[in-house]
Every structure is written in structure tokens, then in C-alpha cells.
Image (tube, rainbow, N blue to C red):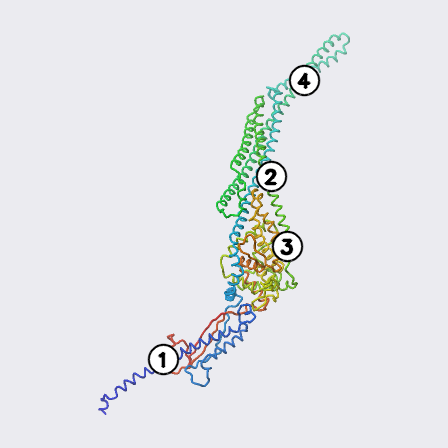
Amino acid sequence: MGKFMYSEKGAVSVYLILIIVPIFLFQAVLIDFARIKFAEKETESAVKAATRSVLSAYDNELQAMGLYGLGISQDKAKDIFRDVFGNNLSAHVSAGGFHYVDTKALNESIRLTPVYSLASHVVFQQQILEDMKIKAPIEYTLELTDKFRKSGTNVPFQQGSQFSKEGAELEKLLEQREGALDEAWSYSEELHLKISTYHSYYQARITELDRLASEIGIHTIEEVRSQLTAVKDQLKSIHESLKNLDMTLAALSQAGPEAAASMQSIFASKQVMNEQAQALVQKQNEFERLLTLIIQYAALIAETKVEVPLNQKTVQKLQQTIESSLRIAKQKNEEIRIKLNGIHTSMTNSAPEVYEVFQSVNVIGDDYFYTYQTSVASITSLFTAYQEVIDSIYLFTPDQTNRANLANNAYGSLSDEFYGKQGALEKTRMDKHAHITANKQEQKNKIQTILDQAKQAIGGCQITGDLNFYSQLQGVGGQGLGNKGFYQKYREVNAQEAMIGNEVNYDLEKAEPVSLNAMSMLEAFNQAATSLRNEVYVNEFALSKFNYRTYGMEKDASGQSRKSNELIDPGNHMLLNQEVEYLLYGFSSCGANMSSAYAEMFSFRMAIRTLEALLDPKKELLNLGSPLLVLLTAAAEGSMKAFQDMNKLIKGEAVELSAKITTAALSLTYKDYLRIFLLLHSNNTKLLARMQALIELQTGKDLVLETTYIQGNATSDVRLWFIPQMMKVIEGTGLLGCKVYGNRCQLKSTAAYAY
């Protein structure tokens, strides 16, 4: 026994046992860990496959339009997910057989979450871009870009638009200058009228004052009053004496014959006294008349000294008003000079002949304004000098009268001289301006006649049931009233203001704005056609998936009606031959959308036809120096030809862009012009909402429910072969990737996919 205890035989076996046990434990853990990771990968693949399988059940009707949305209910989608997920796990492959990994689905944990739908503008646009990324560049290049690039329209379009823009700006300055000059001359005429009135008035006043002064002489009012009082006292004394004599005579008449001699003496005295009284009365009357003349003279002097300063203020105020108008006119004249210098500097040898009109524009010289202002100021100054003369005169002696007349005649003569010379200049200026204005009005009337005919020819709406469709699209009762339509719904889903209509607004109401707006379209097109953008894909989607006025009327090269290459036929849509017009303008009636499309198309054709006329201007018009008159004359001719072009376009016929502008033959159809307008207005954020509304109207599919992005969540578990407790310990480290329940480990997986 002791020998056994101390023997070294078998020590290796014990050592091996001690080593093998940990190795076995490590291998057991490693095997289960590997099985868990395998099951994790399998679960992840199964969830992805299940999610993709759900997306495979897309809506076929939407797919025909190039859009993808989940075409089944949430419950059916969940069933597909559950079946595909379970069928892709090991436990389902061969029931009862040996499985290295027996991954099983936990059906109660399956969750399918829709995230985005076709109602989102971001998603909707992305799907359009995917559908059109091959079609659109080809279609766009062949149908529009190459045509214009090869036709050489860029330079003429730019020149025509620039001429219109510069001509309109210059015409505005000319009208402002002419208006200010007209106002200045109107006040100048008023000044001349007042000066003439004042001159005549004060001439008569000076004459009257001179007459009174000559009659009054050197007498003063105090002296006359004193003498008048003395005369009155003498008269009073004589009257009292006469009264006493009469009493004496009465007494003597009773004395008898002896008093006869005394009575004779009294009669003689009385006669003398009566003669004295008559002389005094005559002197009294003369003094009273002299006093009246003095008072009248003093009153006229005082009145004149009050009136003249008031009149001077009126003259000065008129001068200030005239100078203010002249300053404005001079400022506008200087702006005209600067504008013309800029135009002449930018002109090249290749500039069209029509630019010669800028050389005929009248720029008024500075001497005109200097002479005008100094003449008015001189008149005011002379009237002020007249006022000073009147203020200094108190007695109109011959010298003072002559001095006053000279001062009065000075401002009157200068006013007459100014009115004669300046009046001739102003008449020439106003006659020329009136002639140009009359010609412009004549051309506006011609344009207006064509515009009125164009408004009558718009048409294009034939379906009486459109109102019901528009009620569904736009809502009942208009913006802010009644029920909301599909359009408002999709705007609100995207957190956008649901306003009806469009910022794009073309009409055929007034000749001049229509002409100027038409020419601005050429520059806008040049800028828009310089590059391809994502908006082009969206525009081509609209033209290929929706109908328009001439859809089905256009012919191919063989003369046959063009057919759509799409899986759907836009010609069978509910809203017949007006969908693209609705997408462009967004009004709640066929008439409003068609009118806007017609007006914009007419304006574009009018711009091109006007440009043709501008390239061959009439020489006599260029010499008048009115760019707007030249433009309106060209627009009158262009509007007539544009109206003829529109009659062809709305019938589906192609119209040559221009025989004068283009270097290569180029014909465009109604559809081509819609493509241009979509390009011009491609930043319109309302276009996507209108497309979505039309799709729901046509298909009856609520795009809010058409899921395009889903997230699938599922859980599976796998049986642990060895030492579950050890795996529980490892779970706490975060390396395991599953959660241990008993002898099984649960694995969760998530997958998200979008169309």
C-alpha cells in the first residue's frame, strides 16, 4: 500500500484528465457559440428574404405607371412574412432529421412596420427618378434640348429678350422724364398766366395811384382835416350871423317906414354873408373831396403793400414747384444718358439693326435745364425786386411812378419772353411725344384686337362631368371651404400649405404687359435649357403618364396617330385631355387651366414672332427714338402670326419655330410647348401633389396607404447542446448575440427594405 502511494506510474494520465476536461468544456462552448452565430446569420437572411417577399406583392395598377407600393393589406403582408421567415429556417427544412442548427421561428414575435408611403414627396419623386432615369434623358434630348441647341436660337432669344428688357426700362425713364417736364411746363404756364395777371393788375394800380397822387399834390391828411375844420367853423359862424340878421329883420319889419334904411343895410350884409357861405361850402366840398382822395390813396397804398408780398409768395412757390419737377426730369434724363451709354458699350458688331433705335433716343442737353431754371428764377427775382420797389414808395411822384412801372414791366416782359421761347421748345417736345404716344396706342389697339380673338378661341373643354372630378381633386367650395380634395391631402401630408392655383399666371388682358411678359419668356427659356436637372425627369413623367389637350391628335412621321409606349394609355383617363394643364396651373376648372396654357403658349409664340419682326424693323420707327413703340409695332405683327400658329398647335399640328431665327429647321408641337413650360416652372413644389391627386382620382388608390418602405422584425431560437449555464454566463458579456432561456437561445433580427 505504501508502495502504491509513492509510486510515480500513471501520473501522465491524471495530468491528461486535468487538461482534457477544460478543453472539452471550451470545445462545448465553442460549438454552441458557432451554432448560435450560424443561427443568427440564418435568422437575418430569413428576415431579409421575408421582407423582400412582402415587397414583391406590389400594386400592379401603380406599377403600370412606374410606381411601386404595397398592394396588399397589413394582415396579408404579415402572413407572407411569417411564411417566408419560417420556411427559411433550418427546423423547417426536414422535420425529424438531424440538424446542426435547429432554428425555429417564434411566430408571436413577428412584427411588420410600414415606414414610408407614396404620399411622401421625397419617396414619390425618388420613384419617378428611378423610372425615368433612362427614358427621360433620351426623350428630353431628342425632343427638346438637341432641337434648340442645333437651331441656334440662344443668341437671338438673348438679344430679343435683352432689347425688350432694356427698351422697357428706358421707356419707363422716358415717360417719367416727359411726365416731369409736362408737369413743369404746366406750372410754368400757370406762372406766366399769374405774372401776366399781376402785371396788368399792378399797371392799372400804379396808374391809379399816380392819378391820385397828382390830384392830392403836397397836401397831407392832417393839413386837409385842419383846413376843413376851419372852413366848417367859419360856415357855422356865418350861419349863426345870418340867423341873427333874420331875427333883426323880423323886428325891424314891425317898426314901420323909418326902419327901411336899416333893413336895406341888413339885406346888403346878408347878401355878402351868403356869398361868403357859398364860397366856404365850395371850399368845404373841395377839402372833403381831397380828404376822400387821400384816404383812397392811403388805402390803395396799404392794399398794394399787402398784395404784392402775397403774390410774391405765390410766384416763389410756383418757382419751387417748377424747379422740383425740373430736378426730377433732369435726374431721369441723366439716368437715360447712363442707360444709353451702357447699351452702346455692350453693343457688338453682331447686334441687330433694331438697336439703332437707342441711338435716336433724345437726351436733353444740360443747357436746356439751365436756361429753363434760370429764366424762372429771374422772373421770380424781378418780381421780388418789384416788391422791394413797392415797399419803398409812399408817395407816387412822377419819378417814383416811373420807377414802379419799370419794375412792373421788367418781370412782365421777361415772363412774356420766356413763355414765347420756352413755349416753342415745349410744343415741339410735346407734339413729338404725343405722336409717339398715339402710335403706341394704335399698336396696342391692334394687339388688343388679336388678344380678344385669342380669348374667344381658347376652348379645349368638352367633358361636362369635369366639375365632379375637380371637386375630388381640389375639394368642394375652393380653398378653406367645404371638404378637402386629394390635392390638399397630399400637401398637408408633406407639411405644405394647401393653396389652390399657382404662382404661374398668364393672361391675355392688356396689350403692353402681354408683349413685355412674352419677351421675358425667351430669356427664362435660355436659362432653363442650359442644364439637365432632376426636375426634368419629373416633367417627362408627367408628359408620359398623363394626357393633355392634343393627346391622340399628333401624328408621327408616317402620318399615323402617335401612340403611348407606356403600360397605361393616358387617353383613357377620367380627366380627358387636360391632365398636364392641370399639373402646370392647378386651377379648379378645365377652363381656367386651358386658358392659362393657351395664354402662355400664345405668349411664347408671340415672343418668337415679335423677335422675327424686330430683326427686320421699319427705319422710320427707329428714327423716332422710342424703343417701346418699336417693340409694340413688332408685337402687333407678332400677335397676329402667333394667333395663326395657335390655331394649328391646338389641332395637334407642328409649327416651325421660326424661319428667320433658327439656323436649322425646327418644328414644335403642343406637347413640346408643354414640355417647355414644365421646364420653365420646374421649381413648382405643387406639381408632385397634383400628380398624386390625379393618380388617386384615376386608380382609386390612397397613396397614404401605399407603403414603399417596410421594416420587418422577427425572433427565432436555437437549442443549446452543451452547458446552457455556461452560455448564460457568456450572455452577460454581450458577445453571444442571443438571450438564453433554459436550453434555448432566442435571436432577434430586423430588416428594412424599400422599393
Q: Amino acid at mark 3?
A: Lys
* Mark 3–mark 2 distance (CA, rounded to whole Å): 36 Å
- Residue ID for mark 1: 30
Q: Amino acid at mark 1?
A: Leu
The mark closer to the camera, 1 or 4, is 1
Number of other residues with Cα within 10 Å of mark 2, as a class: few under 14, some 14 to 19, many 20 or more: few
* Mark 3–mark 1 distance (CA, rounded to whole Å): 86 Å
Instruction: Measuring from the top left, give residue 86's x and y in whole percent.
Output: 48, 79
Q: In terms of sequence position, does the residue under pointer 4 or pointer 2 come before the other?
A: 4
Q: Amino acid at mark 4?
A: Gln
The mark closer to the camera, 3 or 4, is 3
Q: In terms of sequence position, does the residue under pointer 3 or pointer 2 come before the other?
A: 2
Q: Secondary structure at mark 4?
A: helix
- Residue ID for mark 3: 455
Instruction: Measuring from the top left, give residue 22's x and y in whole percent.
Output: 32, 82
Q: Is residue 28 above or below residue 690?
A: below
Q: Amino acid at mark 2?
A: Asp
